Amino acid sequence: MNLILMGAPGAGKGTQSEKISEKWGIPAISTGDILRAAIKAGTALGNTAKTYIDDGKLVPDEIVIGIIKEYLTSDACKNGFILDGFPRSIPQAEALAAMDVKIDAVLSIEVADEKIVERMSGRRVCTCGASYHVAFNPSKVEGVCDKCGAETYIRKDDAPETVIKRLETYHTQTEPLKAFYEAKGLLVTVEGQDEIADTTRLVFEALSQFSV
Ligand code: ADP
Ligand code: ZN
């Protein structure tokens, strides 16, 4: 099963891709996590990416396309994968189509902008990829990741003014991908719910029509 997860920033792509990954035993590849790891490591890639990310913009297509190519051709992806946060623009989708991988489904998690802004204000994340919300999905111990015990933190790009810009970026550059994949008969949409478990149920239902 080769799956693409779409949705606005904060729609719950990361959270749901983790659930799908556990259930189906296929890796989730998050371009956002990969870029943040590069920033943390202080690599040239990270330094370039940081200026775009902090400004709520997309990192240039060539960069993320290069990253994805490397991952998708690795052994870990041979039984399937979940792309979380890629593609995010038409040129990225075209580059993916030109790679030798078949996409089975594109799942879009729909959440209204007002809700997104509310969610992002309480988001806490961990370098291991885990994501929490102070009110809706708190870690067991405040400020400590349930999964790995590291300290959770607030993403710099979750600042309210940057969230507004990221939503704009999403609507102008990423949302057109829905029509792109709809035309290929691959698009499935799910309404993001207030409770994570409710969204997960809808996600599993929506994906049950595809062979695993
Ligand atoms: P979210 O989905 O909540 O915005 P991500 O962690 O997926 O968070 O992405 C964070 C940032 O990383 C994006 O705002 C963007 O700057 C950059 N990024 C991630 N994936 C891509 C991509 N496929 N193309 C360009 N930029 C990307
Ligand atoms: Zn962690």
Image (cartoon, rainbow, N blue to C red):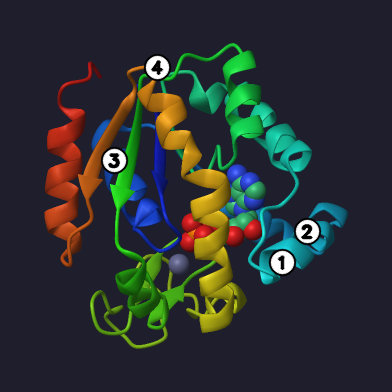
Q: Amino acid at mark 2?
A: Gly
Q: State whether residue 31 is above or below residue 119.
A: above
Q: Which residue is mark 2?
A: 46
Give coordinates of residue 27: x percent, y percent.
Answer: 44, 36
Q: Nearer the viewer, mark 1 or mark 2?
A: 2
- Residue hosting label 1: 40
**Quarter holding the C terminus?**
top left
Percent from the top left, x then y, of residue 37?
Answer: 66, 59
Q: In what quadrant of the picture does the N terminus appear?
A: top left
Q: Residue at x 61, y 78 (%)?
A: 156
Q: Between disc 1 and disc 2, whose residue precedes?
A: 1
| Left or right position of 29 against 47 | left
Residue tagged by mark 4?
Answer: 184
Q: State the image quarter where residue 95 is shown.
A: top right
Identify the residue at image location x=36%, y=25%. 182
- Looking at the image, do the residues carrying marks 3 and 1 touch, with CB atoms under 8 Å apart? no
Spatial CA span between label 3 and label 1: 27 Å
Residue at 52%, 73% (x, y): give it. 164
